[in-house]
Amino acid sequence: MNMYHFTDDGLRNVWLENGYREQDTPYGKAVAFDDLDGLTRAICLALTRKPSKLTGTEFRYLRQGMALSQPSLGQLLGVSGQAVAIWEKTGRVPKMADTTMRLIYTAHADGDAHVKSIVTALNEAERFMLVLRETSEGWTASTEAQTAPAIAA
């Protein structure tokens, strides 16, 4: 049986039996996935049930599966974003962080309203944009939270 080695974001131990198509492009072979969101969720859930400790890459994959930045996850875990970055880079994820990440991802994926609201709030806090407007009475700040627009590179 021909299988595809799925190495998204540095994963090394994921192989796909199906759910993908190899295509020829002018730049060489490319791979298309039938349900990438579903695949990502399945990988993340499988990682939460992994019997051994998460690697830094696997920890990062779970974090990104919830669209959390390193600082946001750090805030959730009570550490700095830099600590999260170090864990992901070195692979030395503390047992507390490993266990907590598995619980948070599983609850988030299962639709736990409290966990989803915390993750959503952290994601929105990162994209908060303070809008100021000059009026005849001086500068005033908008009282509504707004999502920051994408900034062109």
Image (cartoon, helix red, strand yellow):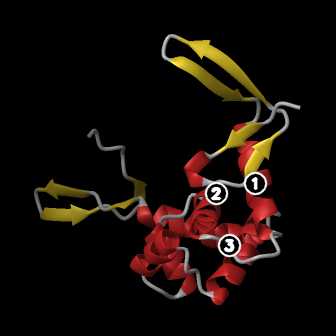
Identify residue for label 3. Answer: 54
Identify residue for label 2. Answer: 65
Res 57 → quadrant? bottom right
Figure quadrant of the N terminus:
top right
Task: Give the CA separation, mark 2 to mark 1.
Answer: 9 Å
Ranked by sequence position, the earlier of labels 3 and 1 is: 1
* Amino acid of disc 2: Gly
SS label for mark 2: helix
Identify residue for label 1. Answer: 43
Q: Position of residue 111 (x, y in %)?
A: 80, 63
Contact? badges 3 and 1 (CB < 8 Å): no
* Amino acid of disc 1: Ile
| Residue that extends furthest to the right in the rendered view of this protein | 1
Res 81 → quadrant? bottom left
Q: Residue at x 41, y 61 (%)?
A: 144
SS label for mark 3: loop
Ranked by sequence position, the earlier of labels 2 and 3 is: 3
Contact? badges 2 and 1 (CB < 8 Å): yes
